[in-house]
Amino acid sequence: MESIMPCPEDILSIYESDDKDGQSGPIQCPGCGSCVGHTKHGSYSRYMPDGKDLVSVPRFRCHNGACPKVTFSILPFPFLPWNRHRLCFLFWLVKAVMEGKSLRAASVAQHMTRGMIRRAFKRGRQVVEWFSMERHRSRWGPNPCRSPAEHWTAFTQAFSCAIFPNLFPR
């Protein structure tokens, strides 16, 4: 069976070695797509997926009066919007289940409740389906984890619009 996991096998070493603060490219409002007309509006803290390090996530205020977003944040690698799990964990979980591992076994291995694993698996299937369609035709493809400083912001914006269409209408 061909692997559905688009993240490279050595993703953990990439994740650990990449510069988490090195986002580049223009800051773009996810609500209106504007690259101008916004100002820094503070920040909030979020723990890294391993739960050890605290990272500051910048927030911005969009000054476009027609924009549905008043403020927005630019998530650094490896954070995903509205997800506590990183992208490669979701891919690992879907791959593990497709290879015959039970959700119960995954919940024990990850020290998570079965409800958390079920929700992560459901979201993971949705992400894998979308990712497999988009990864070769988008500006962040084929793998945003390879060079997050260049692609993570564009990837999370596309991710938000595809996975949460009610929150980010096109």
Image (cartoon, rainbow, N blue to C red):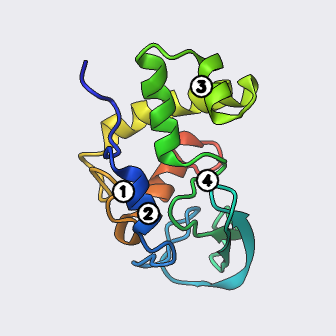
Label 1 or label 3, whichever lies nearer to me, is 3
Across and down, in percent, residue 56 comes to 67, 75
Label 1 crowd (10 A; few <14 / some 14-19 / many >=20): many
* Residue at (61% x, 53% y) in the render: 81
**Labels 2 & 3 near each other (Cβ < 8 A):** no
* Residue at (61% x, 20% y) in the render: 105
Which element carries disc 2, helix, strand or loop? helix
Label 2 crowd (10 A; few <14 / some 14-19 / many >=20): many
Q: Which residue is mark 2?
A: 152
For the residues marked 4 and 1, what is the alpha-carbon distance in whole angstroms?
Answer: 15 Å
Which element carries disc 4, helix, strand or loop? loop
Label 4 or label 1, whichever lies nearer to me, is 1
Which quarter of the figure has residue 40? Answer: bottom right
Q: Is residue 167 visible?
A: yes
**Labels 2 & 4 near each other (Cβ < 8 A):** no
For the residues marked 1 and 3, what is the alpha-carbon distance in whole angstroms?
Answer: 25 Å
**Labels 1 & 2 near each other (Cβ < 8 A):** yes
